[in-house]
């Protein structure tokens, strides 16, 4: 049985494509602006301007450093205003409730 040359080329191209798919990284890597403490310093003021945000911090999610945004209560409006990433770090929202200073 003989295979036409153009069919061989198509099969070879398909084989290379399929082989390349197996080499793709399991997750997308994101370029970070810098260490998490520098990203927090650079972006906390803008995040704190959003109503309902009471603080920021660094955290860990599945072994990855994350930009944590503390809120007094979760709302769809607030979450729509928050980016999914800041400075290349995933943003995680944590509800802290209402925070106030203790009486003197």
Image: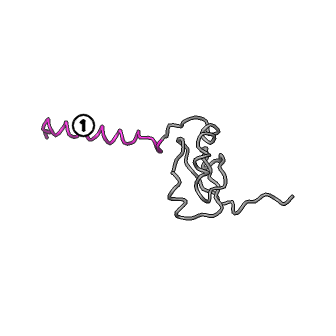
**Relative to 82, is 59 on the left or the right?**
right
- Magenta region: 1-28
Report x, y in % for residue 73.
63, 64
Q: Quarter-wise, where is residue 7 in the image?
A: top left
Q: In terms of depth relative to the viewer, which is nearer, 24 or 67? A: 67
Report x, y in % for residue 26.
47, 44
Residue located 55% across and 60% down the image: 78
Residue located 60% across and 47% down the image: 67
Predominant SS along the magenta part:
helix
Near mark 1 (Cα within 10 A), the count class, few <14, some 14-19 or many ≥20, is few
Which residue is tagged 1? 12
- Residue 67 vs 104, above or below: the answer is above
Residue located 62% across and 56% down the image: 53
Q: Quadrant of the C terminus?
A: bottom right
Q: Is residue 7 magenta?
A: yes
Q: Quarter-wise, where is residue 6 in the image?
A: top left
Q: In terms of depth relative to the viewer, which is nearer, 36 or 44? A: 44
Q: Is residue 31 magenta?
A: no
Q: Secondary structure at mark 1?
A: helix
């Amino acid at each position: 049985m003989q295979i036409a040359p153009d069919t061989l080329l198509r099969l070879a191209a398909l084989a290379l494509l399929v082989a390349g798919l197996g080499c793709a990284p399991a997750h997308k890597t994101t370029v970070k602006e810098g260490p998490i403490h520098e990203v927090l310093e650079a972006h906390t003021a803008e995040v704190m301007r959003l109503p309902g945000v009471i603080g920021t911090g660094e955290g860990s999610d599945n072994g990855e450093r994350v930009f944590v945004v503390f809120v007094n209560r979760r709302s769809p409006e607030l979450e729509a205003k928050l980016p999914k990433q800041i400075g290349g770090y995933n943003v995680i929202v944590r509800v802290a409730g209402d925070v106030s200073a203790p009486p003197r």
